[in-house]
Every structure is written in C-alpha cells, then in structure tokens.
Amino acid sequence: MIRLEQTFMNFLLDHQERHNRTYNFLILMDALTSAAKHIEHYYLTGALKGNLGLAGNLNVQGEDVMRMDQIAQEITVHYLRTSGRVIHAISEESDKVIPINTESGRYFVYFDPLDGSSNVPHGLPVGFLFGVAKRNLEGPEDGHLRAGRDYMAAGMFVIPTGTFTLGLKDAGTWRFHIDETMDFVRPTRMILPEDAKKWELSFNAASRYTYAEKVQNWIEQNEQKYVFRYLGSLAADFHRILSNGGMFMYPAIVNHPDPKKNRPQGKLRLMYEAAVVAFMCREAGGAAVDETGTPILDIQPRKPHQRTALYVGSKLLIEDIGRVLSG
Ligand code: FDP
C-alpha cells in the first residue's frame, strides 16, 4: 500500500471552516506556496543556469544583491499581486513599501524571499520567510507597521529542502513536506521538546567576543550543556531548533575590535525575520526576546527595515537569558 497524505490546502480549508473564516487567507497561502515552489525550482537549477552569483548591485541594507534574490523577489511579488488579496508588502529586497492591491487587498505581507545569502553560491539551504497581518476592514486603515503579536500567521520555506513550516495564531505551528506532485502534505504539529537532551545552541561562534560581556558570560557558563550547530541561514538554523529545542541567537555586536563593525541594534530584521520566527516559536511553546529582554512579538516597528537582536527557542532558555539581558 502506498501512503497518501493530507494536503496543506485541505488542512487549511478545514482550519478556516472550523473557525468560521472566509477563504481569502487560503488564496493568499496558495500564492505564497506557489511562489515558494517556483523559487525552489530556480534554486535547484541555479548552478547550471548561472543564477547563484551576484547581480551586481546593492540592496537597501547596502549588501550585495544575488541574482537569486532578484528572481525570488519578482516571483513573490507576481504571486502576491495575482492573488488580489494583498494591500501592501514589505520586502527585504525593496527600499519602499510595495503597493499591491491598494483598493481591495486585505492583508499585509512582510517577507524576505531568500534569506541566508552566504549559502546561495553553494546551493545550500536558504529561507523564504513571511509574516501576515490583516488590514483594518472597518474604518480607516491603521497602518502597515504591525508588531508580531498582531500577525495572524507567519511561516518559512526552507529552500531547496521541500519543507514548509507555518504558525497560525492561537492554532499552533505546523510542518509540511513537499510530495511527488509538488503539493505540501502531512501536517505535523511542532511542539518544542521539553527534554533538554537534544537542545542545541546556534549562533555565529566567531563573533562571540563581540557580544555584550553578560552574553559572553552566559555562553561560557552554559554552552557545554548543549550541542552547537550553525549554518548561517536563519530559517534552516531555526528549523532545527523547532525540532530539537534549544536557542538560536543573533546578539547585538557591541565589542567589535573595529568599532565601525558594531551593530548595537542587532543584525536581523524585525518584521520579516525576527518576528516571523518568534511567532512560530510562540505557537510551538517557545519564546523570543531582544537585547533588552523584551519579547520580540511586543516590539512595535517604527520603520519597515528595523533591525533587532534575537534570542529565540525553548522557553526555559529564553527566560534564563532574558533575566541576564534585562538585569
Ligand atoms: P545573510 O546575512 O547571510 O543573508 O538575514 C541575515 C542572515 O543571513 C540570517 O539568515 C543568518 O542567520 C545570519 O544573517 C547570518 O549572519 P552571519 O554571517 O553574521 O553569521
């Protein structure tokens, strides 16, 4: 007997019906999964077609744009536009807020279509991360800069592994795998394991002496209890933490020997990186804080590309480091 699985769309349809919701979110998710599959296709053949190199320009953060970043951006905006459900989008690849269906759209989408750029030339895992918030449907629009606690969903595709993880507000975090027909299937509820045996720490170890002293001390006192893993791609590193437990961190850089390289605000972007993983983590029983110990999901963004430090993972570990950070 072959084993056939429930599809993502079927799972979501069931979810929407159980909560008496419209199908608009389904249409949006169809657009996002289609975009992810399309990006995955380009990524898999990227080395052959010369798509894994630099595009020759810089992005809004002053970083080199890869050819794949542009492809992924074009694909995602296309699918969001044709869904007819998105009012505005904020993307890592675009300086300004992107108007999509400004009259009829219902959702704000915050995304990074290809995160983890150091992995791109090697064809190794990168992430397509996104958060979704709903516009105010009654009365005047209340702005597109939403805190993570106001997202209705947040998810990530780890490309090109065929995995998709989605956090749904108050309804858990679910993982899906791509099947032979390119459908995402087999909803599996993700709950961070309480047993610390498999817990991992994930951070750029080469940068540890650039962190605040209290963070360095915490690492020294705790690292030997856990396994260390770091790929340098937030989605892929967080994917492991969700399964095994532990903590991913990208602390503020405050003690760099070259002070110009300090990043007191942190490196990761709040709206389409930190809040996305923090949302999925909360729905899986975990937590996330910034450099002051403030919950990531409570931070009200002041600008689209705001950066933050990030500590995300198993609740006990985040509470522990949170005490150190806020102390
Ligand atoms: P990258 O700069 O390679 O695109 O989004 C930023 C990000 O990747 C994350 O995906 C990753 O976790 C982190 O930065 C890696 O940064 P370091 O190279 O400083 O470790």
Image (tube, rainbow, N blue to C red):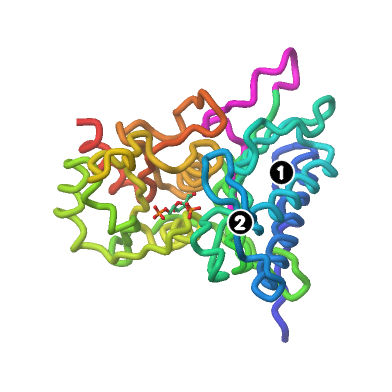
When the figure is inspected, residue 214 is found, relative to residue 156, above or below; the finding is above
Q: What residue type is labelled 1?
A: Arg
Residue at figure coordinates x 49%, y 47% from the top left: 277
- Rendering coords of residue 176 (x, y %): 62, 62
Mark nearest the camera among 2 and 1 is 2
Q: Looking at the magenta stretch, what is its main secondary structure?
A: loop
Q: Which of marks 2 and 1 is nearer the N terminus?
A: 1
Q: How crowded is mark 1: few (under 14 residues within 10 Å), some or many (20 or more)?
A: few
Part of the protein shown in magenta = 136-156
| Identity of the residue drawn at 70% across and 39% down | 19
Q: Residue 208: which disc?
A: none
Residue at 57% across / 56% down in the picture? 127
Whole-percent x and y of residue 266?
Answer: 38, 39
**What residue is pinned by disc 1?**
18
Q: How crowded is mark 2: few (under 14 residues within 10 Å), some or many (20 or more)?
A: many
Q: Quadrant of the C terminus?
A: top left
Q: Which residue lies furthest to the bottom in this view?
A: 1
Cβ–Cβ under 8 Å for marks 2 and 1: no
Compare residues 135 and 265 and report the one nearer the observer.
265
Foreground of the two, 289 or 244: 289
Q: How many marks?
A: 2
SS class, disc 1:
helix
The residue closer to the viewer here, 217 or 6, is 217
* Residue under pointer 2: 66
Quadrant in which the N terminus appears? bottom right
SS state under label 2: strand
Find the distance from the CA under tag 2 to the CA under tag 1: 42 Å
Q: Where is residue 16 in the image (x, y as percent from the top left)?
A: 73, 43
Q: Is residue 7 above or below residue 309?
A: below
Indicate yes or no: mark 1 CB to ligand 1 under 8 Å: no
Q: Is residue 153 visible?
A: no
Q: Is residue 150 magenta?
A: yes
